[in-house]
Structures are given as C-alpha cells and as structure tokens.
Amino acid sequence: MKKLFALLTMVALLSFAPVNLTHAQADGDQPQVEQASNDSTATDTTKVADVPDQSLDAEDAELLKKQETFHQVLKRYFIEGDAGFMSTVLFSLIFGLALVIERVIYLNLATTNSKKLLVNLEEALKNGGVEAAKDICRNTRGPVASIFYQGLMKYEEGLDSVEKSIVAYGSVQMGRLEKGLSWISLFIALAPMLGFMGTVIGMIQAFDMIQAAGDISPTIVAGGIKVALLTTVFGLVVAIILQIFYNYLIAKVDSLVNDMEDSSISLIDILAANKK
C-alpha cells in the first residue's frame, strides 16, 4: 500500500512538473518581453530624439541671419568672396583713406582768413613798415601768408618783382596742396579693377567646378557667381567712398587756390597804394 501510494505520488509529481516549469518559463519570459519592448521603445525614442529637425535648423539659421549686425554681414561676405582678392580691395580702401585723412588735415590747416590777414598787413605797413608786415606773415599759418611773405621779400625791388615772386611761389604752394591726390585717384581706379579681376577668376573657378561635376548644377553655378560678384561689389563700394572724398579734396584745393589768387591781387593793390 505504501509502495502504491509512493508510486502514485511520483506519477503525480512527474505529471505536474512540466506544467509548472512551463508556467514558470512563461512567467519569467513576460518581464523580459516587457523589458525588451521597453528597450525597443526607448531605442526608438532615442533614435527619434537623435534625428535632427531640419525644419528647426533652417528656421534657426534664418533667425541668425536676421539677427546679424552690419559688421557681421560684412565679415561673412568678405570671407565668402575669397579673402585673397578681398584683402587687396581692403588694402586699397585703407591706403586711400589714410591719404584722404592726411590731405583733409593739411588743407584744413592751410585755410586762412585772408580778409583779416590783409587788414592786418595794411595796418602794419602804415604803422610799422614792411618789417612789421613780414612779422605778421611769419606768425600766420597757411599758404597765403607764405606767398605774402615771399612777395614782401621783393618789396624793395619794385612791384614787378613782387608780382613775379608771388606767381612763382604760388605755383609751389599749389603743388603742395595737390600733393597725394594722384595716389588717391590711383586707388579709386585700382579698387574696381581688382574687383573685376576677382570676378573673372571666380567665374573661371565656377566653370571648372561645373566641368569637374559633369553637370550644370544650379547650386554650383549660383555659388560660383555669388563669390565672383562679391569682389566686384566691394571694389565698387571702395571706389565710391574714395571718389566722394577725392571730389571734396579737389573742391577744397580749388577754393584755396582761388583765395590765394584773389588775396595776391589785393596785396599788390595795397603795396601799390603804400608806394604812393
């Protein structure tokens, strides 16, 4: 009986063991499946998160372009237009502006109140003679006073000598006033020429890229033409800036020359009246 009961117990255990093992495996696999599912979901989420949003990048780039300052825009175009040719155009602007600043300072210092100077000279000639008039000219700044001084140096030789001295020294002073203007005009002509040369070379490079690609791509053509035309734009801008200052300097020189001529005629009249 005990053997029969033991046999039945063994049969029962053997019968239920596979079932329990199956349930145990099922119960153990379920978390793994869920974990795998969670891992898959997390991976997908990570992949989705890692994928860049191209639309957002484009919007950000557009916003950055809108927020660029004028200096940043110039810097970006300078780099895009090939720094080699852009540097030559920039040097033309720097050297041209340096000459312009020097001429503006010189011509402004050369400006003299000629009417007041003539009045002082007339009073000095009446009260202190020629030497007093020379002292006034020595202490007065500008080409007009220098011309007057050279004329007074020849006062004892007669009015003809005074007039010849004034004309001769007036030419010297005119040359000093016009000094450096030819270099400014050189940079005015040089800047757009350098820009055009950069444009031609840029177009050649664009056609080389088209030939290497074997196809006319709008991106390649547009990029090459953009780089080529930037040098021309910068060259024209430099020429316009220097041309404005050049015209101002020419007008200033003409004004000073006219003032010298008028004042010289007035000085001759004063000296002629003083001779009498």
Image (cartoon, helix red, strand yellow):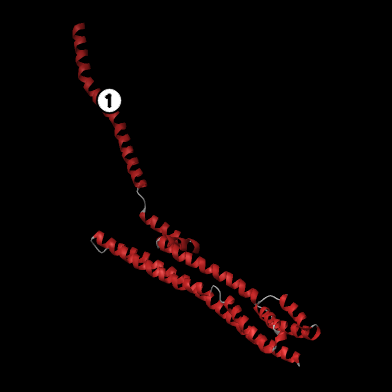
Q: Is residue 186 left or right of residue 5?
A: right
Q: Position of residue 271 (x, y in %)?
A: 72, 88
Q: Which residue matches tag 1?
A: 24
Q: Quadrant of residue 169?
A: bottom right
In which quadrant will I find the N terminus? top left
Q: Quadrant of residue 236?
A: bottom left
Residue 34 vs 214, above or below: the answer is: above
Residue nearer the viewer, 26 or 218: 218
Figure check: 40 above or below 28: below
Residue 67 seen anywhere in this rendered image of the structure: no
Count residues near mark 1 (Cα–Cα under 10 Å), then give few for <14, some for 14-19, many for 20+: few
Mark yes or no: residue 84 visible: yes
Classify mark 1: helix, strand or loop. Answer: helix
| Residue positioned most to the front | 157
Is residue 5 toward the left or the right of residue 182 in the image? left
Query: At 31% across and 63% down in the image, what residue appears?
Result: 205
Q: Is residue 226 above or below residue 54?
A: below
Q: Amino acid at mark 1?
A: Ala
Residue at image point 61% right, 75% down: 107
- In percent of width and height, residue 26 lies at 26, 29
The residue closer to the viewer here, 13 or 125, is: 125
Quadrant showing the C terminus: bottom right
Residue 122 drawn above or below residue 216:
below
Whole-percent x and y of residue 187? 47, 71
Is residue 256 rendered to the left or right of residue 275?
left
Which residue, as the protein is rendered here, is positioned at the far bottom?
A: 276
Q: Is residue 148 left or right of residue 95?
A: right
Q: Position of residue 194 (x, y in %)?
A: 41, 68
